[in-house]
């Protein structure tokens, strides 16, 4: 099912570049967020080591670096959520367009009957 839905989305001439671009942006932002979380973890280790060694210079350097990472992390998470939501909206737009294209086309005579003669109660 995923293959039948995913391939047309990523190969559709109208949405192909946008779909691939959003996928690359999403994956990149996920990797950036994971890297920032990893760096926070490493800095927490250095912070704890500096406290244990009573090294004031290393302590304040680590505190400044941790504060910088802690400020960057919410921005990265926000951008990831924004890119993910944009990707989801594009995916839904594509599926809706595909579904309506199949449902309302020239071959659907019952739809044309209802539009041509509104007095028809049940065109089935």
Image (spheres, rainbow, N blue to C red):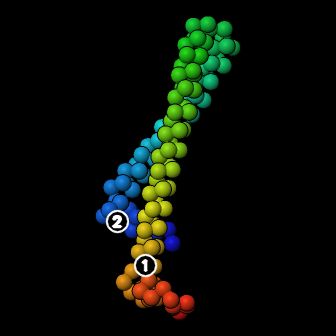
Furthest residue to the left?
13
**Circle 1 Cα neighbour tier, 10 Å, few/some/many (<14 / 14–19 / ≥20):** few
Spatial CA distance of label 2 from label 1 is 19 Å
The residue closer to the viewer here, 39 or 106, is 106
Residue drawn at (55%, 32%), measured in percent from left and top?
73
The answer, for residue 7, to whether it is visible in the render is no
Determine whether, in the image, residue 74 is placed left or right of residue 112.
right
Callout in the foreground (2, 1): 1
Residue at disc 1, secondary structure: loop
**Circle 2 Cα neighbour tier, 10 Å, few/some/many (<14 / 14–19 / ≥20):** few
Residue at disc 2, secondary structure: loop
Q: Which residue is mark 1?
A: 104
The residue closer to the viewer here, 98 or 52, is 98
The answer, for residue 32, to whether it is visible in the render is yes
Residue 90 image position (x, y, % from top left): 44, 57
Q: Which residue is mark 2?
A: 12
Q: Decide: is 57 above or below 95.
A: above
Q: Which mark is residue 49?
A: none
Residue 52 image position (x, y, % from top left): 69, 14
């Amino acid at each position: 099912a995923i293959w039948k839905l995913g391939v047309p989305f990523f190969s559709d001439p109208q949405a192909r570049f946008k779909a691939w671009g959003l996928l690359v942006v999403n994956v990149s932002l996920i990797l950036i967020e994971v890297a920032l979380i990893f760096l926070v973890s490493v800095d927490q280790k250095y912070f704890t080591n500096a406290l244990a060694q009573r090294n004031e210079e290393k302590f304040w350097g680590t505190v400044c670096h941790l504060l910088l990472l802690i400020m960057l992390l919410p921005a990265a998470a926000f951008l990831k959520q924004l890119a993910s939501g944009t990707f989801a909206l594009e995916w839904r737009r594509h599926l809706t367009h595909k579904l309506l294209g199949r449902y309302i086309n020239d071959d659907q005579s019952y739809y044309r009957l209802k539009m041509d003669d509104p007095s028809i109660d049940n065109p089935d």
